[in-house]
Image (spheres, helix red, strand yellow):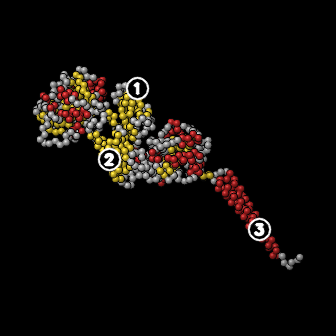
């Protein structure tokens, strides 16, 4: 059919061709972009977390799992030690099956300090329990870095899973040039209150039978609230001795005084107990000491036995006395005696002086009583050898005691109120000493004109009492005066070797056993209740033995040191109270500390996320983008389909 004008039809044809060409171009672009996205996806691109990271294959994964007592705290996910174990397993699963692992806890066990495969490390994690051991974070870091450095041609990533308690996290000591990439994984806990026994001590360094003891217990409260009329119990040899109470304000400490008497001799094992929750390991504090069945006293005489000393000591069942002349001194047996009295002997040989000094250095107690007839030079040689003040001259003028040092332990509990008109001993012959202050000397008795009659000095771990006069009637009436009895009774009672009443677990301390005549092949340390024992590492030095406990996993409690079946000594161990102060670094705090000390190569992983395994993979391998490009390819395919359907 003929139309008069077809220009409109030509215009429609041109428009249709233009649209078709545009549609083909859009489809082509969509298909090209789809192919590009698929190619990029199969190339598996990643975004590295920081510029410091390099594309590398990790050959060693180090995991430190903090298992200190503070990890018993509760969080919204349960006990944080269990949360930490789950996080450790997530780390293991986030890496390749062929990866080698290094695992450490605070125990630094030898079996852990090797490289293992995934299955063995999972077993180590599963069997981990809380321990009294704690380590500074820098110590752990150094330990792991030292191990990694021994493994040549290996890349390593180290993970620290901890509550990052402020007492044990020392960022200032962290290595600033670690060869390993380090990731910190802080575990958050509920804010806990805690009241605990910080320490105990006695008012005097000596324990004695039948006498009143004052035990001071330091209780610390780190919570925001105070506590009133809280019970405190004292046990002696597993018997409840007394029950008291204490009050302690918020964020403060309180010292509680407990008074009791020793009704037994021998080994005394004590503990103080309070009640507090949820942190319970620091609610009990153990201590121990011993009271000798008899105080063994050696008296070395000039010619005859001193009748005043012998009559006093031999009439008291608490003392066991032996007398020797100055020509027959049992020098080799000094260590058997609590107290040695040198009564008016005139000659001190070089061997005697050396043994006396060793005896004093090791904690013995001696009494020096001069002889008026002796040469002053002989005595001064001895006094100068012991670094004591020397004798100046003899004074035969009649005087009397003018002052008693009632602040000193010797008289503190004996003489309460000294009245002005009290008749004090008369002195008729005595030596005057120089005052060169060569040693830590303390005057106990002095004359009215200020001359020393009795003084005491510390030598090593022992004490020596120096009289300025002989103990006889020719030198005054001191030997018949009532002051004589408490003077020598207290010298003898306090001559018992005083030692530490407790030791702290995880503190570098050696236990020293002195004057041990013979030991079996192995000493054994056994808990009093028989539930735990071990053979410690010992170092022999003559008659002294040092016990090193740094490699032993100890429980708090009272212990006995045994030589075969014989008990040598009783000791007490307590957990370190550093873990009792429940203050932690938050993630923000950690970031600030890392900036403050310019610590590089350390990153933080927030462990509260449920996608921890994925986050760890991203941290170690970078963020993988292939999924994103697959999605982009699908989007372009969808766009292509839409273009085909919409452009008709």
Q: Furthest-bottom residue in view?
A: 4
- Is there any visible trace of residue 392 in the rendered image? no
- The residue lying at 16 percent from left, 31 percent from top is 479
Q: Furthest-top residue in view?
A: 327
- The residue lying at 37 percent from left, 50 percent from top is 221
- The residue lying at 15 percent from left, 32 percent from top is 480
**CA distance separating discs 3 and 2:** 96 Å
Quarter of the view holding residue 98: top right
Label 3: element kind = loop
Label ID, residue 648: 3
Label ID, residue 520: 1
Q: Position of residue 202 (x, y in %)?
A: 30, 41
**CA distance separating discs 3 and 1:** 104 Å
- 155 vs 593, left or right, is right
Confirm or deny contact between disc 3 and disc 1 (CB under 8 A).
Answer: no
* 61 or 31, nearer to the observer: 61
- The residue lying at 19 percent from left, 40 percent from top is 415
Q: Quadrant of the C terminus?
A: bottom right
N-terminal of the pair, mark 1 or mark 2, is: 2
Q: Position of residue 597 (x, y in %)?
A: 46, 49
In this rendering, the answer to whether 34 lies above or below 569 is: below
Local packing at callout 2 (Cα closer than 10 Å; few below 14, some 14-19, many 20+) is: some
- 636 vs 477, left or right, is right
- 207 vs 182, left or right, is left
Quarter of the view holding residue 336: top left
- Is there any visible trace of residue 398 in the rendered image? yes
Q: Furthest-right residue in view?
A: 1
């Amino acid at each position: 059919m003929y139309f008069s004008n077809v220009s409109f039809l030509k215009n429609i044809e041109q428009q249709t061709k233009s649209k078709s060409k545009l549609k083909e171009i859009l489809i082509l672009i969509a298909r090209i972009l789809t192919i590009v996205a698929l190619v990029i996806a199969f190339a598996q691109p990643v975004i590295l977390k920081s510029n410091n990271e390099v594309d590398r294959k990790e050959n060693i994964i180090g995991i430190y799992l903090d298992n200190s007592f503070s990890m018993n705290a509760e969080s919204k996910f349960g006990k944080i030690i269990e949360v930490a174990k789950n996080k450790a397993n997530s780390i293991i699963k986030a890496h390749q099956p062929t990866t080698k692992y290094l695992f450490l806890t605070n125990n630094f066990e030898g079996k852990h300090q090797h490289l293992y495969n995934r299955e063995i490390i999972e077993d180590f994690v599963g069997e981990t329990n809380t321990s009294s051991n704690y380590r500074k974070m820098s110590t752990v870091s150094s330990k792991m870095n030292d191990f990694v450095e021994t493994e040549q041609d290996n890349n390593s990533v180290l993970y620290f899973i901890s509550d990052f308690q402020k007492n044990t996290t020392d960022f200032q000591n962290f290595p600033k040039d670690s060869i390993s990439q380090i990731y910190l994984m802080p575990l958050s806990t509920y804010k806990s209150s805690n009241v605990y026994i910080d320490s105990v001590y006695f008012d005097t360094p000596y324990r004695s039978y039948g006498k009143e003891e004052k035990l001071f217990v330091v209780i610390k409260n780190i919570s925001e609230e105070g506590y009133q009329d809280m019970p405190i119990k004292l046990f002696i040899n597993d018997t409840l001795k007394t029950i008291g109470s204490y009050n302690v304000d918020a964020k403060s400490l309180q010292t509680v005084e407990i008074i009791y008497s020793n009704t037994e001799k021998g080994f005394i094992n004590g503990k103080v107990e309070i009640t507090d929750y949820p942190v319970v390991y620091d609610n009990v504090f153990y201590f121990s000491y011993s009271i000798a069945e008899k105080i063994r006293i050696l008296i070395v005489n000039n010619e005859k036995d001193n009748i005043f000393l012998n009559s006093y000591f031999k009439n008291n069942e608490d003392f066991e006395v032996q007398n020797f002349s100055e020509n027959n001194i049992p020098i080799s047996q000094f260590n058997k005696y609590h107290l040695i009295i040198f009564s008016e002997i005139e000659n001190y040989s070089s061997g005697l002086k050396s043994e006396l000094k060793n005896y004093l250095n090791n904690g013995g107690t001696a009494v020096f009583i001069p002889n008026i007839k002796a040469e002053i030079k002989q005595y001064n040689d001895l006094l100068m050898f012991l670094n004591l003040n020397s004798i100046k001259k003899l004074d035969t003028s009649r005087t009397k005691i003018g002052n008693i040092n009632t602040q000193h332990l010797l008289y503190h509990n004996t003489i309460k109120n000294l009245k002005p008109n009290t008749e004090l001993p008369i002195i008729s012959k005595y030596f005057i000493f120089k005052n060169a202050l060569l040693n830590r000397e303390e005057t106990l008795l002095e004359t009215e004109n200020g001359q020393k009659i009795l003084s005491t000095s510390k030598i090593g771990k022992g004490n020596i009492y120096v009289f300025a006069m002989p103990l006889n009637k020719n030198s005054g009436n001191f030997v018949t005066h009532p002051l004589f009895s408490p003077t020598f009774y207290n010298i003898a009672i306090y001559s018992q070797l005083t030692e530490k009443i407790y030791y702290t677990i995880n503190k570098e301390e050696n236990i020293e056993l002195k004057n041990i005549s013979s030991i079996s092949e192995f000493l054994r340390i056994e808990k009093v209740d028989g539930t735990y024992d071990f053979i410690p590492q010992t170092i022999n030095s003559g008659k002294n033995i040092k016990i090193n406990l740094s490699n032993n996993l100890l429980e708090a409690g009272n212990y006995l040191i045994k030589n075969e079946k014989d008990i040598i000594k009783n000791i007490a161990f307590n957990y370190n109270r550093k873990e009792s102060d429940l203050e932690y670094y938050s993630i923000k705090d950690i970031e600030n500390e890392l900036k403050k000390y310019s610590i590089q190569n350390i990153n933080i992983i927030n462990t509260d996320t449920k996608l921890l395994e994925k986050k760890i993979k991203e941290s170690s391998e970078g963020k993988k983008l292939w999924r994103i490009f697959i999605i982009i390819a699908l989007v372009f395919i969808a766009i292509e389909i839409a273009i085909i359907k919409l452009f008709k």
